[in-house]
Image (cartoon, grey):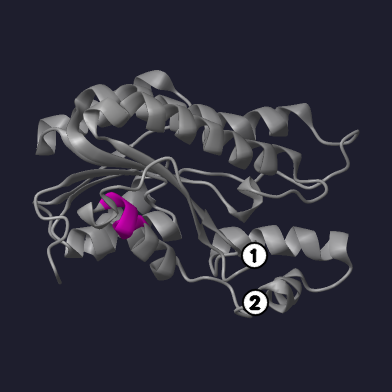
Amino acid sequence: MSNQMQHKVCVITGGAGSIGAASGKLLRREGAKIMLVDLSEAALKAVAADIGGADSVAWCAADVTKSDQVRTAIASTVSRFGKIDVLFSNAGNFGTVAPVADYPEEVFDAVLAVHVKGAFLAAKHAVPQMNDGGSIVITSSIVGVKGDPGAFGYITAKHAQVGLMRVLAKELAGRNIRVNTIHPGPVDNEFQLNVEKNLSGVLGRDATAFFNDIIPLRRHVRAEEVARSVLYLASDASSFTTGSLLMVDGGLSA
């Protein structure tokens, strides 16, 4: 442990998912105080227990698409730990894959609400409670820089997060708050496995094997590897990095 995040207060939305949990564990190991935010109280309790250090890890169940709930989560963080140094906006959902004429409008709306409105609301409520010199990291995706057929909600949302990041990076530069996106390729987790089960039918072959075939490093990324990229952007190691897209995709976007 190098204590890169000693005494830093970090909020993680999507904190009960694999990337959120792995990032919380790594940031805590580096000395941070962690507020986990997600929908499920049971899942949050389990992740918090796994991270350990009850004095430095807390959780708040909230729907990131609801402004009042996000406001409450931020207020709970400040009340418990003090002003915020890092916002890791990581909440996400996938939706479905379908031709544009068949893609359900309600699914499109729901996916954009979590990824785009959720990231906007997290920033809206967290930024006034952030210390100058802090960091915002938004989880986009490899598909935030490319397109594929059928995943209209997810891919549109992931592109939109890049636009949000760029606006925030320019707006907050005067406070030395850095804002960046991370772009994982296919992740070895339950979220991606469920996506690939659906895609297998569309592709007519095993989607997991398909992705491994086209990724230059020939495998899915592990949540712990994504967490190390989050740590880089959250810490002073990236003190002159803002407005950037960090690819964590094994060369898939090259």
Measuring from the top left, give residue 7's x and y in whole percent: 9, 50
Image quadrant where residue 122 sits = top left
Compare residues 168 and 189 and report the one nearer the observer: 168
Does dot 2 land on a helix, a strand or a loop? loop
What percent of the width, then of the height, locates residue 50? 26, 64
Question: In the picture shown, does residue 139 fall above or below 114?
Answer: below
Residue at the image position 58 percent from the left and 73 percent from the top: 220
Above or below for 132 versus 198 = above
- Magenta span: helix, strand or loop, mainly? helix
Residue 107 lies, with reference to residue 180, above or below; the image says above
What count of labels does the image hold?
2
| Residue found at x 39% / y 52% | 16
Q: Which residues are magenta?
A: 230-234
Residue shown at 33% from the left, 52% from the top = 233
Callout 1, which amino acid?
Ala
Q: Kindly indicate whether the residue at mark 2 contacts the one at mark 1 (C-beta within 8 angstroms).
A: yes
Residue 223 sits in which quadrant? bottom left
Say few, some or many: other residues with alpha carbon within 10 Å of mark 2 (under 14 / 14 to 19 / 20 or more): some
Q: Residue at x 71, y 32 (%)?
A: 108
Tag 2 residue:
216
Q: Which residue is mark 1?
A: 254
Numbered disc in front, either 1 or 2? 1
Q: Position of residue 134 (x, y in %)?
A: 23, 39
